[in-house]
Amino acid sequence: MTKGWHLEERPHKLRGMATGIGSLPHKDVQAALDLIFKYIPQIPFWPQLPNRDTREGMVAQFSQGLAGIEVKELEKFYEKVINQDLEYFKITQDYASGLYAFAQRLSDKPELLKDVESLKCHTTGPFTFAASIKDENGKALLHEPVFMQAIIEGLKMKALWQIRFLEKFAKKIIMFLDEPYLGAFGSAYTPINREDVIKGLSELTGGIKSKADVLLGVHCCGNTDWSIFTEIKALDIINFDAFGFLDKFTLYADNLKEFIKRGGIICWGIVPTSEFSGQETPDSLRERLDEGINVLVKKGLDKEPLLNSLLLSPSCGLGSLDTQKSDKIFKLLSEVSFSIRGKTP
């Protein structure tokens, strides 16, 4: 079994630590792992490598057994779900070279585990996944309730399979749901309602939590209605683009206050990715971070719990960048993390 956190342990264990989102630009999986373990050894993540193989794209990677579901196959599908047949929902190595190489490196170099507080996994969220898959008439599965429900169940099983795959390392697990589609929530381009999003994500996160003792996070790299995520009781972490949308995020101070009070964690995507210029410094990013914290404190959040519930990440995945930029971004991320934790790189 994986080890979970008691609420009172989170501040001491997690404050100021850093992790990554999903994708990296590397074609060489070992080079990707070198970067991860060099800069974020406390919460390393397994990397998606879409430039290495299109099957490692964020939707394709989790499509095995899901994208081609037909009505006549649903009975077999739900039989596998009911029987908790996790092997049926496995992600194979040709779809996730980073995951298998990640586990192999931890097995080959167990000394790495002494620095690890948690291992981070991820899956595409159901709304982003369903919006990307279309039926034979070109209609997104997002608008097909039967298939939407199957996607939620299938992604739950894929998350649980990942947890089982890595539990042999006896480290606590963080699982992120990546939902970039919700970054345009409320616009004409996202014709879904708030209640459906809360219901769908509550089912998925609640289903995972009922089977595994993990921390569950959601990553959304655009602007959205952040109160949606604060209402999902099984969600522990909200990850947002703190470089680009700080002013939008802090509008939800009242919701975030309750979220923090119940033990929620904010993961600040403080290092820009698509907007990365190379002019950023640890000091400038720390100032940006402090700005956001101070705004929330002025709006009524207590500073110490806010700092205790602080994680760091890049603002989004790095799959569309190049390896040189990714190294600079993770170096900055590591330096900001060290500054918060009062340590020297």
Image (cartoon, rainbow, N blue to C red):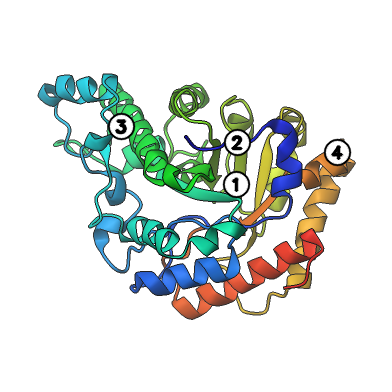
- Pointers 2 and 3 in contact (C-beta within 8 Å): no
Q: Which mark is residue 299?
A: 4
Q: Nearer the viewer, residue 108 or 234?
A: 108
Q: Position of residue 16 (x, y in %)?
A: 72, 54
The reply to whether residue 49 is visible in this rendering is: yes
At label 2, counting other C-alpha atoms closer than 10 Å, the crowd grade (few under 14, some 14-19, many 20 or more) is: some
Task: Return the disc, 2 or 4, that comes first in the chain's sequence.
Answer: 2
Residue at figure coordinates x 18%, y 23% from the top left: 74
- Label 1 – label 3 distance at C-alpha: 23 Å
Q: Which residue is mark 2?
A: 225
- Pointers 1 and 3 in contact (C-beta within 8 Å): no
- Label 2 – label 3 distance at C-alpha: 26 Å
- Label 1 – label 4 distance at C-alpha: 20 Å
Q: Position of residue 236 (x, y in %)?
A: 61, 35
Q: Which mark is residue 239?
A: 1
Q: Which residue is mark 3?
A: 154
Total count of labels? 4
- Label 3 – label 4 distance at C-alpha: 40 Å
Residue type (three-letter) at the residue carrying disc 3: Gly
Residue at figure coordinates x 45%, y 68% from the top left: 33
Mark 2 or mark 3, whichever is nearer to me: 3
Residue type (three-letter) at the residue carrying disc 4: Lys
Residue type (three-letter) at the residue carrying disc 1: Asn
Check the image and report above or below for 1 versus 102.
above
